[in-house]
Image (tube, helix red, strand yellow):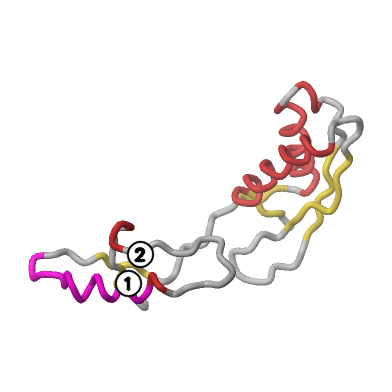
């Protein structure tokens, strides 16, 4: 298993970067090297080891109809304004990489619910559901 060394640098030791500027400035990388040269680790210091690989998220298998119903109910019960929300259409997609989500929202039936506000709630619910569920076969 490949292992890499991670160093902790305080933000006050790094120069201010042009955040949101027109181009990326790699000042932080050279500054980290400078900080390390100025303050090398001593014999008693602990090093932090981190593996490069992350564990895959464990998702529970759920049926397509049940997932659609759960998302619809989550939006409806979030606020009385969204009681007229009709539903969500989920589509199975082919997985591009291991650990990726195997479903996406194909369509939304808003009914008389406010599209913008209920869409924001639905977006949040979908993000949570994609971390938690995968479609069963």
Q: Do the residues labelled 1 and 2 touch (CB within 8 Å)?
A: yes
Residue 121 to residue 55: above or below: above
The answer to whether residue 78 is left or right of residue 55 is right
Viewer-nearest residue: 23 or 122: 23
Residue 84: percent from left, percent from top: 86, 27
Which is more toward the observer, 118 or 21? 21
Q: In the picture provided, is 58 more to the left or to the right than 90?
A: left
Residue pictured at 84% horizontal, 33% vertical:
114
Q: Is residue 40 left or right of residue 65?
A: left
Mark 2 element type: loop
Q: In this view, does 47 lie to the left or right of 66?
A: left
Other-residue count near label 2 (Cα within 10 Å), few / some / many at <14 / 14–19 / ≥20: few
- In the picture, the quarter occupied by the C terminus is bottom right
* x and y, in percent, of residue 121 in the image: 71, 37
Q: Which label is found at residue 15?
A: 2
Q: Quadrant of residue 79?
A: top right
Q: Which of 122 and 70 is in front in this view?
A: 122
Residue that appears at 56% across and 61% down: 20
The residues colored magenta run: 29-44
């Amino acid at each position: 298993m490949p292992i890499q060394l991670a160093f902790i640098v305080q933000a006050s030791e790094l120069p201010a970067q042009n955040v949101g500027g027109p181009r990326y400035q790699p000042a932080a990388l050279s500054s980290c090297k400078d900080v390390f040269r100025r303050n090398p680790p001593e014999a008693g210091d602990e090093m932090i080891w981190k593996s490069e690989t992350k564990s895959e998220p464990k998702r529970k298998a759920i049926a397509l109809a049940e997932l659609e119903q759960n998302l619809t109910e989550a939006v409806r019960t979030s606020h009385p304004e969204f009681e007229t929300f009709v539903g969500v259409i989920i589509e199975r997609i082919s997985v591009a990489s291991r650990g990726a989500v195997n479903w996406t929202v194909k369509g939304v039936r808003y009914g008389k619910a406010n599209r913008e506000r209920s869409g924001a709630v639905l977006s949040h619910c979908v993000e949570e559901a994609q971390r938690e569920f995968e479609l069963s076969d």
